[in-house]
Image: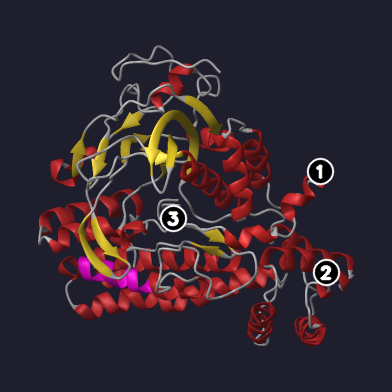
Amino acid sequence: MRRMNMPFDAPLTASPGLHWRNRFAALGPQFGTRLQATPLPAPHWVAHSASAAQALGLDAHWLPSDEALQAFSGNALLPGSAPLASVYSGHQFGVWAGQLGDGRALLLGEVDTPHGPQEIQLKGSGPTPYSRGGDGRAVLRSSIREFLCSEAMHALGAPTTRALCITGSPLPVYRERAETAAVVTRTAASFIRFGHFEHFAARNQLDALRQLADTVIDQHYPDCRTGAAGNGNPYAALLQAVSERTAALVAQWQAVGFCHGVLNTDNMSILGLTLDYGPFQLLDAFVPGHICNHSDTQGRYAFHRQPHIAYWNLYCLGQALQPLIGEPAAVHAALASYKTEFPRQFMGRMRAKLGLTTPHPAEGAVMDGILQLLADQGVDYPIFWRRLSHAVAQQQFEPVRDLFADRAPLDTWLLSYSELEALTGKAPDADLMLKTNPCYVLRNHLAEEAIAAAQAGDFSVLHTLQTLLERPFDEHPDYTAQAGFPPDWASSISISCSS
């Protein structure tokens, strides 16, 4: 593919079909710093998401162009965009970290799309005033992981930021070792985090705090002003709405087996989106205490702790909003919605995984029973659920039994599972199960194989994997290996915050 170099302010002659607004930049200079990206030398295409481009209403003929390559590498300014790095603060690993901010990201602005306004952000576009001594770059390895997982999670139905494309460069970047640079272009209705609110609350900048809260309410939660939630207090209603969205998000994570790995308050989305894919992992064996981030030496962000940590982070958000909400009792009442919504959402997700369409009091014991059994025997999580789906469809359970070293407890559980049909009058819905339990998930070893090939200049492995993950519930007979058990070496993969 032809490579080009352009000055940053080079005019773009082709239209990408984007109509910009810059509402976050209009909030004022205390919310961030306007600046341009640092040009990326000799950029080249790594990957695109046709689905994300379509969601933006992007001109399909413009996206593969050299002008798009320069724009999404930070080398040319898209007409109408107003690049900005936002400032925020936050708690990291449970400790107040003070001021943080977009240390390697630039918000280009907001565009109108067929699905409503969406922000577009470059990640890895060079240093900003919030880089804290860092180079502001992303490496190809981490960029591929974020691109694949954000698009995979979207296909699984999990709320998430999207990834439009990756551009790469031979520019050396140094982490644990020398690597090459890349830029991910990602999109979301908003990139505002819990940490944005913590930032202004910690500085007692209450006017800015109110301005930010009002903006979020007006743009994303208008019912908080007009609805019954919050008893006429829009800021309490906002906290409750965010709590409920976060509960739904974490329930989806737990059901699909997704470990975030670094659930700091600055990595929590005010819209309940999966944000900042760093040391994440989708479970292989079902190990509730699994820690996917080798930097997490205390296991704070272990898989089974995610629901509790999400509430802890919401509590921090509640403390930041308290000057606007008023009485602490109103804060606690708003937060309480998480404790009722999370189990409700999780039960709904697990019910679908089991193909149950009619709730029954006995279902809780069945759900708890299989999760305990999977944990006791370290059974592969996605393969179990997919095989169970096929077993229900074909009424042939031997492939499921083959996953267990000790079959007797499984047989006891299968009996209790079958008894739900008599109790509810409905058999498990195999079609629902096959649309809920994916055949393909982004396992760490699959990502590592795509990364290794890409680092050698071969992007075909990445593109094949992307295609599979974009249709995770479909069977692809020529790619059964990607749906199979992880190799032995997968257990030695080490993922850190630099990932």
Q: Secondary structure at mark 1?
A: helix
Q: Position of residue 208 (x, y in %)?
A: 14, 53
Q: Height in image: 77 above or below 356?
A: above
User: Which label belongs to residue 407?
Assistant: none
Q: Is residue 22 visible?
A: yes
Question: Magenta residues?
Answer: 311-321
User: Which label belongs to residue 273?
Assistant: 3
Q: Position of residue 275 (x, y in %)?
A: 42, 53
Mark 2 residue type:
Val
Q: Residue, x 66% and y 38% (percent of image)?
A: 461
User: Which label belongs to residue 478?
Assistant: 1
At label 3, counting other C-alpha atoms closer than 10 Å, the crowd grade (few under 14, some 14-19, many 20 or more) is many
Query: What's the CA distance linking mark 1 and mark 2?
Result: 24 Å
Q: Residue, x 31% and y 38% (percent of image)?
A: 107
Mark 1 vs 3, N-terminal side: 3
Q: Quadrant of residue 264?
A: bottom left
The residue singled out by tag 2 in the image is: 392
Question: Quarter holding the N terminus?
Answer: top right
Residue 199 relative to residue 371: left or right:
left
Mark 3 residue type:
Leu
